[in-house]
Amino acid sequence: MKPFMLNLKQIALALLVIFSVSCSPEDGEQGPPGEDGNANVQTITFDASSFDGTASYVEIPELTEDVLANDAVLTYLLMHTSSEDIWFQVPCPVDLWGFDYAVDVNMSVGYIWFDYADGNGDSTSITAGDLQSGKVIIIESSSTTSARTSNTKQQVYAELKQAGVDINDYYAVCEYYSIKP
């Protein structure tokens, strides 16, 4: 029994030495700081300056079936006027911000389609340069982030409304979610 206890003590001592030598108190170098932001909000920017004709589309790989079914997706386009740059939410009606056309939006997995119509609802053409840029803001609902609870994209919209955030106002949405405009 004595040799067994001696061997057990030697094994325990050897393991203690191995673990204390293998664990170094030194840390590696500190990495660069990450970007500020909201972990549950994605912003995707795209070039819209070449959009022309009666319809345009852009690929947005982040638009998955899950995102379209559960998350709030806000889409904005940038128009440059003679006096200012204006971000407007789409879909939008005719004569909003001085437009001569309405913009409708259709989303599908991986894509957003923009259709342009006149005041009568008939298709109309835009020319390249009428629009400059676009942004898609995806706000995850907790049904995406916490195992499919009942919180849906409609509740995201309700939360924004309750907080006094007008989703038609691009800058208000950016401020609320700490997004750089």
Image (tube, rainbow, N blue to C red):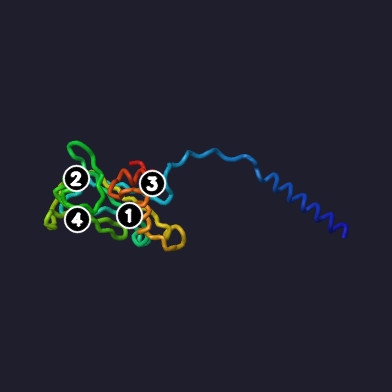
Residue 138 position in % (x across, y down): 35, 53
Q: Of the residues shown, which amino acid type is indicated by label 1?
A: Val
Q: Nearer the viewer, residue 174 or 165?
A: 165
- Distance from disc 2 to disc 4, alpha carbons, whole Å, reads 17 Å
Q: Which residue is mark 2?
A: 97
Which of pointers 2 and 4 indicates the residue nearer the eye? Answer: 2
Identify the residue at horizontal 37%, vertical 49% (top origin). Answer: 163
Q: What is the CA distance from the residue labelled 4 to the residue labelled 3?
A: 28 Å
Q: Is residue 47 above or below residue 106?
A: above
CB contact under 8 Å: marks 1 and 4: no
Q: In the rendered structure, which amino acid carries the disc numbered 3?
A: Tyr
Q: CA distance from mark 3 to mark 2?
A: 24 Å
Q: Please, what secondary structure does the residue beneath circle 1 have?
A: strand
Residue closest to the eye, 173 or 6: 173
Q: Earlier in the sequence, mark 4 or mark 3?
A: 4
Ranked by sequence position, the earlier of labels 2 and 4 is 2
Q: CA distance from mark 2 to mark 1?
A: 22 Å
